[in-house]
Amino acid sequence: MKKQIHKIVLFLFVLVLVLWGVTVNDNGQGLKEAGLQEKYIGSMQVHFLDVGQGDSIYVRTPDELDILIDGGPDKTVLSELGAVMPYWDRDIDIMILTHPHSDHVTGLVEVLRRYNVKQIYYTGALHTASDYLAWLEEIKEQEIPLSIVSNRFNIDLGEEINLEFLWPLENLANKKVTELNNTSIMNKLVFGEVSFLFTGDNEAEVEAELIERGVDLKADVLKSSHHGSKTSNTEEFINLVDPESVVIQCGEDNSFHHPHGRVLNRYERSNRNIFRTDLDGRVSFITNGFEIEKIQ
């Protein structure tokens, strides 16, 4: 009898080790193989998800808070989240919709149906596309707290991590806007000495206004605005952000011809590390607040 109990205990112990290994290797982005486990204990991970021609960014903090910015144009975001989130975690603590275009909102509808979303931020700008309306209806049915971004503010995520909201600077709730791209929520994520700038689809006009207002845009990693469009990513803006790495989220052979060659030249001339989801797939970083590394 004692031998049987011993075998059962040993089996359970081995099973726990195996499951832990799967979590580290699959959902921890191969930290074990990369030799980064010790160095990045208490780390933050930022994943620019490969969702085709669209945006979706997932952040996991040291306190295991889950943040999702945009959801891409279809259900691909679900498989991407499955690859980077621990399999037992079904909570999204913060969801942000930068603006209601389909390549940012459509995937969020399915996320709402599959995950427990606790808090949502959006601009409230008027838009009548069916996928955006479906997203709003799902939020209403689930009674999820919904906040409108209309000014600059910070969210303290603990462990010296702040999520800063930099744009828009006016209340757009139920307002019809000609250029929805320029209503995009812009966030800066700061962990100690390391920062990421998430720009949505904002174009040159917004970049110029932020520069004129003297907003601190400096960041180590920049998400290239509007999928690397020539209507964004001005040279002055890039130089002010001064990123070490740039991530362009776009789909392979997309009909918009993103990213534009002129924008690529700007980044290449200034010797930035350029990563593209159409060529590189999912682009992931890990940081302990002092150092940052790209991981696979």
Image: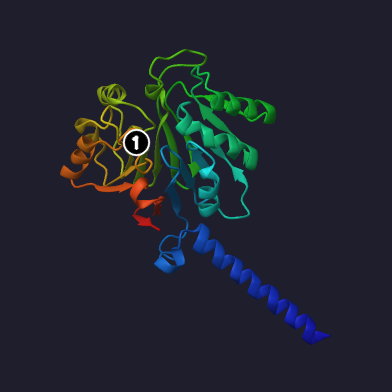
- Residue at (51, 53) in percent of width and height: 84
Judged left or right of residue 281, residue 113 is right
Pointer 1: residues within 10 angstroms few (<14), some, or many (20+)? Answer: many
Location of residue 60 with respect to 198 vertically, above or below: below
Quadrant position of the N terminus in the picture: bottom right
- Residue at (50, 19) in percent of width and height: 127
Residue 208 image point, x, y percent: 26, 23
Residue 156 image point, x, y percent: 49, 38
Q: Which residue is mark 1?
A: 227
| Amino acid on which disc 1 is placed | His
Depth order, front residue of 64/17 = 17
Residue 275 image point, x, y percent: 31, 48
Depth order, front residue of 225/281 = 281
Residue 32 image point, x, y percent: 46, 67
Location of residue 133 with respect to 283 vertically, above or below: above
Depth order, front residue of 151/204 = 204
In the displayed image of the protein, which residue is found farthest to the right?
Answer: 1
